[in-house]
Amino acid sequence: MNERSVVGKPLPRVDGKAKLTGRAKFTTDVVLPGMLHAKLLRSPLPHAKIRSIDTSKAEKLPGVMAVITGKDTWGIRYGFVDTPNYPAEERPIAEDKVRFIGETVAAVAAIDPDTAEDALDLIEVDYDPLPPIFDPEEAMKDGAPQIHGEITRNTSCAWEDWGVARKSHSYTPVNNVAARVLVTYGDVEKGFAEADYIREDRSRSPGTSHMAMEPHTMVASWDPFEQKLDVWMNHMAWELKRYWLHKTLDIPLPKIRIHKTYIGGAFGGKAPCFDYEVICAFLSRKLCKPIKIELTREEVFSSCRNSHRFDISIKTGVKKDGTIVAQHCNVIVDAGAYKCSAPVAMFLSHGMCDCCLDRKNVRHEGVAVYTNKNFNFARRGHGAPQMRLAADGQYDQICEDLGLDPVEFLTKNLRKKGDVIPNGDRLDSYGLPEAIKKSAEAIKWKEKRGKQRDKNRGVGIGINGMFSGSGYWPFACTAIIRLNHDGTITLIEGDCEFGQGPDTTYSQIAAEALGLTIEDVTLVSSDSELCPMNYSNFLSGGMFVGGGAVYNAAIDLREKLLKVASEVMRAKPEDIELKDKKAFLKSNPKRAYTFTEIQRYHIQKHLGDPLFGIGYKKAVPEIEFYPSLSKGTGRFTDAYGFTASTAEVEVDRETGRIRVLKIVVAEDSGYEINTAVCRGQLVSQAVQGMSDALFEEIMDDEGRVLNPNLVDYEIPRAFDVPEIEIIDCSDFEPKGPWGAKEIGECARAAVISAVVNAVYDATGVRVMRIPVTPERMFNALKAQEKK
Amino acid sequence: MDSSKKTINVKVNGEPYEVSIKPKMTLLQLLRNELGLTGTKQACMDNSCGACTVIVNKMAVKACSVLAMQVNGKEVTTVEGLASKDGKLSILQEAFLEHSAFQCGFCSPGKLMSSTAMLEELENPTEEDIRRDMEGNLCRCTGYVQYLEAIKEVVRQRKEGSK
Amino acid sequence: MKDFEYFSASSLQEACSLISQYKDVGKVLAGGQSLITLLRQKLISPTCLIDIKGLKELDFIEFDKKSGLRIGALTTHRAIEKSPLIQEKYNVLSEMEKSVASVQTRNWGTIGGNLCSADPIGDPAPSLIALGAKIKLVSAKGERAVALEEFFTDYFTTIIEPDEILAEIQLPPPAANTAVEYMKFATIEAGIKIVSTSVAVTVEAGSDVCKDAKIVMSAVAPIPLITKKAAEMLKGKKLTDDLIEEAAKMAASETDPTTDVHASAEYRKEIVKVLVKRAIKKAFEKAKKA
Ligand SMILES: Cc1cc2nc3c(=O)[nH]c(=O)nc-3n(C[C@H](O)[C@H](O)[C@H](O)COP(=O)(O)OP(=O)(O)OC[C@H]3O[C@@H](n4cnc5c(N)ncnc54)[C@H](O)[C@@H]3O)c2cc1C
């Protein structure tokens, strides 16, 4: 198994032909006989009591089949974080109160979308407005309007199935605080006392949209005879979605089938449970008819999850030579109306960042605050981009203040391969030092840094680290490989394909282990009824956990094949090689048995056993359950991906407009299973990171989103893409499949910091509020001139 | 027949259709809902993303913002019409596959149609031509690079072929 | 979207009679690139559409040395962009068209529809005004010609009567020693314009003296804005950098922009200063060579 022939290559993707000919089925393409369409009525107010809802006129409109309100779904609760300390508080339809503009207050099912929409106009809601609160810092003050009363554990609690059995209790948020986190290690006071230089800075990253191309859509079909729900939906892990549907609607788990569809992009934004999903299934069961809900782009912006706004203050103490001795971070997360993943986000802003540099004494405090706005979820990096901007921006400034070089500064403070970091994670692979070095070389750091301000040009650097899955929930996967009679295999695993490429890379992993080609692999994936357990596709665990399970299954089958072959051939397993659906002697390839023959032999000799491979993998084997979110203790992950990114920009000082000339992404993703897929992931993040740094922000006025469409929420188009160089700095990860770990999320954060730091190098002005729009840059330059 | 409906004749991917539709039906609805050609996608509903791009009489247009009535008597090509019926991909589709020029695949049909129309119009497009003609197609996954490379590869092959 | 009745006009005459018949409840449909989104968002709900897109008689680009250029209202943006005639004689129009929306919208959307939409951020109007455009409006009762600069009255409103159709745009022959320059400013390349401007400069033959100038802008007022005082400052003068800078500042003071998600009013004014300065300089350089 030394020479690799299937992995490590840019093989064409197995989903390509379907996707390039229009035959790939997405949820939006699903049409069932007799299917009805549902639309949701959204709250126009950010905070109000619902006095009454009159649906009678809407019900009378011809073509309307059902109108439901919070009365119908009263008491149903779900949430991404659902623990004894933080029971879930999300609900499919507002009950007696609305908490943000866009919250669902009623739903209509009708014969077509236009009729459903017309019916919405006929629903009369009597609201009693309450004072709203929009800014997280204001919301924490005494006397601010309180968004939630007592939160009681109700229909759903993930903990009771997956966590340590512990009694859950109700709680009432005080001063709108949804959750807190405090992580400490070392002696921060002592660290600062030893510092030669201390800086304190603030930064803000705004809420942004994942902007997946396929708007959120679901089709649900209830079979009243079998009491069974068939579902096609936008998701990132059907296992989670099925679990929530089971809990919220009290349908037995095996009576819910989530069918495979391709997902039109996700980036984190389709993972949690959504109101429309519960409603869609609820309506289907109520009417015994298939229901389709397709959200509009405006609803995606205003009522589906966006990324969290973070306000961070960071204080760092260093020695004269740049050695970091202490750091204190204060993180305020704007949760929005429901907490969703906010408790996780502020923990991860520590958890993901601690693997990069040795900061010695650390205190990381976070608070997630309820506000009367749409609420939020992970977007590609989940807390890391916001934290890295704060940290890498400050390091850049410390270097400026002390006359140090940022590349040398980062290099000086690096952790080391093999280090065990404070929470117990060990860095078995650690390509960050190499990535920093290579990314700096590629941008011509030495020649350019600090030397081009006269040309309004500058270069900057940013870094990041990212989990390869974590201990959240079970976070485990299983894969099954069937050896077919002709020697090909059928790979059965659960991961869903939302663009990241598992259908292809997992097929490669299995083929490599068995000496097959990718064409020899038939794939069954992403179907809750056909596939084994699959919890992997978040926190970047896809390859490491899902791919790891596939690898283990393939190795299992390989070992079985070798064992049987050794019986047949009367040779030692280690003297046998598998290739071209045959087992042969390494010393004499002519002595060969086909997989078909081996299987026939095995079935006859071993009571009909047809040779299956079974493999499973858990993200962090050593931990039993979750790491503590509130204290950051316990293992986080088994392997980290790393990125260093550099960028070169040019600033038009007259207008403030910034043009990115080049982005370099040097990445340690472990071994690259499919180099073209990996490159795609990194280019993607280079462009998204640039866009975060310069363009993207969900803007609101009193809780109303002002740019809920693709005209006003601008993302890069073909012309805006600069030169992008990708450098593979992969360090072999011994626990990963073929040495692979993480690639989907890490780079975005590093690119943001690189661009923002490059802007400083070009201008001498630091803007720590992204996006650095032309106007923000212009104002900062003007302020500089006044000084 | 519903009296508010009108009849149109349109050729889609070479096949003639006669359909009776409400005037408010868009070309996108005609393709997806009436003809079952769901390869053409809807992603923004306000004429801004290009996922629904199809070719009408050799021109790339956004099907969400053209009334079906307006293609009466015209020829429409959708992503389903690019490959040959017996399963051979077009040169451009082949290049997209080779260059990993797609990820989630939701915007790919639109991109294929825009670039197909461009390559029919321009014999030898420059980098600038290509980028400008692709401005109407938003993509969130790919960062555009690999799909621009795929198009350039086709241009290069064509140049070599004509030598 | 609400249901509506649909008529497809087969001649301009038929279109005029249909629209006079349905003027209270109907709307003209050209390429629908703006209209269909408005219908979908229910911002307007006419009960009848009169489709004129198929009218060949309003789809033309014609040039005559004496009378100049005529562009039919149903000419698509793309046709203007790609017209060799326009590229040669009114190059600014084809350059400007490259920045209008996207290829797909330019392929189906019409110049007439663009002007009738009267979007304050529309690109063609400033260039056409800078070139001295007139338009022809026709109705069942007759026709009238108006200067394009008189056409717009407020955000999304024009002087067009409900029974009138914009038939064509007329431009005088290219003036000697004159150049017109279009410039836009947006956050991303194909983004919503924060400001765009078209500047026409005529020089005294063989000198640095400006004989005539016109500065027109979009996105800084409810309608395309002609900054007359700024242009006046240039006329009869030698165009020095200082003078150009002063004129650009004057132009900014004549604007009345608003704040939206793309930029604040104050910032728009700042951008006007830069953009107008750059456009004057460029037009001036080109005019000297013209
Ligand atoms: C996403 C997007 C981006 C855009 N970007 C730009 C841009 O960058 N710059 C820019 O300038 N424009 C831009 N536009 C506007 C675009 O140029 C116009 O939508 C298009 O030109 C309108 O032409 P149409 O033929 O489609 O008009 P329609 O949509 O058919 O009509 C528009 C309006 O004009 C009326 N009308 C049309 N033709 C006539 C006529 N001959 N006589 C009387 N009334 C008539 C209609 O009744 C309607 O009210 C953009 C539009 C979209 C959707």
Image: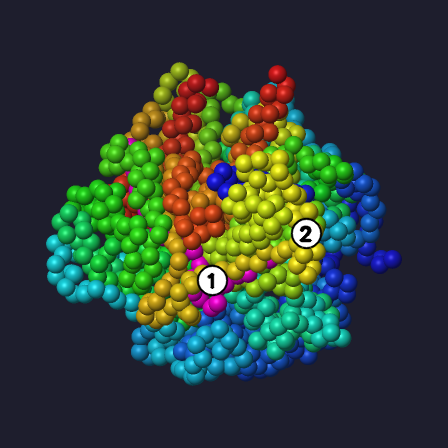
Q: Give residue A581's position: percent from left, percent from top.
A: 64, 43
Q: Give residue A137's position: percent from left, percent from top.
A: 32, 69
Q: Looking at this view, is A759 or B2 the one in front?
A: A759
Residue at mark 2: chain:
A
Q: Which residue is mark 1?
A: A618
Q: Which residue is mark 2?
A: A601
In the image, the segment drawn in magenta is A455-480
Would residue A420 be visible to someone looking at this image? Answer: yes
Give the spatial CA distance, label 2 vs label 1: 34 Å
| Magenta stretch: includes residue A479 | yes
Q: Give residue A380's position: percent from left, percent from top.
A: 45, 55
| Magenta stretch: includes residue A422 | no
| Residue B57 position by quadrant | top right
Tell me the amino acid under the disc marked 1.
Lys
Residue found 43% across the figure and 23% down from its top: C286
For disc 1, the neighbor class at 10 Å (few under 14, some 14 to 19, many from 20) is: many
As drawn, the residue found furthest toward the front would be A570
Q: Looking at this view, is B66 or C6 the one in front?
A: B66
Q: Is residue A137 left or right of residue C132?
A: left
Q: Is residue A550 left or right of residue A449?
A: right
| Residue C53 position by quadrant | top right
Would residue A374 be visible to someone looking at this image? Answer: no
Tell me the amino acid under the disc marked 2.
Tyr
Q: Is A399 situated above or below A238?
A: above
Q: Give residue A403's position: percent from left, percent from top.
A: 16, 43
Q: Is residue C287 left or right of residue A780?
A: right
